[in-house]
Image (tube, grey):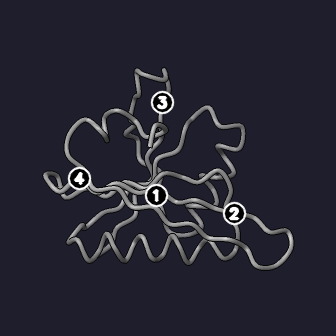
Amino acid sequence: MREAPEAILDSGFIAFQVESIETKAPHARCNWTAFFKSDQEQFYIAAPSAVSASSKQSLVSLLEVAESLNCTTAWMYIDRQRPDFMSIVLAFKYLGFQLSCETVKDTRGNKMFALLRYDLE
């Protein structure tokens, strides 16, 4: 959770953690973390360090959780300084996310996060 921007963790939230392990070689492990802020009905998903074919089902599961919590939008946040930033953005755009002009700043780690929007309706 220390990787989440302080703007997301500044008030009450419920955290979700989903782990997927690729059963075929190479055996990649993918951890998904999400935060639900009930006061704002916002659902934020941290872009994992790696995405495998089987981990996409974990993402779908998180989007279903967001929908069950009556969220109309899910937000994926990605550290803008990641070396693979553009390829991650393009991969999530392919999955239906839209790059937002909004960003989230984290002064604790002096990081800036891009937001990708996924409409659940």
- Using a 10 Å C-alpha cutoff, classify the residue at mark 4 as few (fewer than 14 neighbours), some (14 to 19) or many (20 or more): some
Q: Is 66 left, or right, of 39 in this rendering?
A: right
Q: Residue 63, image x and y in percent?
A: 40, 71
Question: What's the residue type where badge 2 is placed?
Answer: Arg
Marks 2, 4: nearer the viewer: 2
Task: Compare residues 11 and 86 and report the one nearer the observer.
Answer: 11
Tell me the residue that label 3 is attached to.
112
Residue 29's mark? 2
Labels 4 and 1: the sequence-earlier one: 4
Marks 1, 2: nearer the viewer: 2
The structure residue drawn at horizontal position 25% and vertical position 35%, both measured from the top left corner, is: 10
Tell me the residue that label 1 is attached to.
98
Q: Tell me how far mark 1 sits from mark 3, CA to CA.
A: 18 Å
Quadrant for residue 57, please give it: bottom right
Compared with residue 66, is residue 23 higher up or lower down, i.e. above or below? below
Q: Residue 99, image x and y in percent?
A: 47, 51
Question: What's the residue type where badge 3 is placed?
Answer: Met
Q: Residue 118, image x and y in percent?
A: 40, 64
**Marks 4 and 1 close (CB-CB < 8 Å):** no
The structure residue drawn at horizontal position 46% and vertical position 58%, both measured from the top left corner, is: 98
**Marks 1 and 2 close (CB-CB < 8 Å):** no
Residue 53's mark? none
Tell me the residue that label 4 is attached to.
37
Labels 1 and 2: the sequence-earlier one: 2
Marks 4, 1: nearer the viewer: 4
Compared with residue 79, is residue 94 higher up or lower down, i.e. above or below? below
Question: What's the residue type where badge 4 is placed?
Answer: Lys
Labels 1 and 3: the sequence-earlier one: 1
Q: Tell me how far mark 3 sits from mark 4, CA to CA.
A: 20 Å
Q: Is 38 left, or right, of 45 in this rendering?
A: left
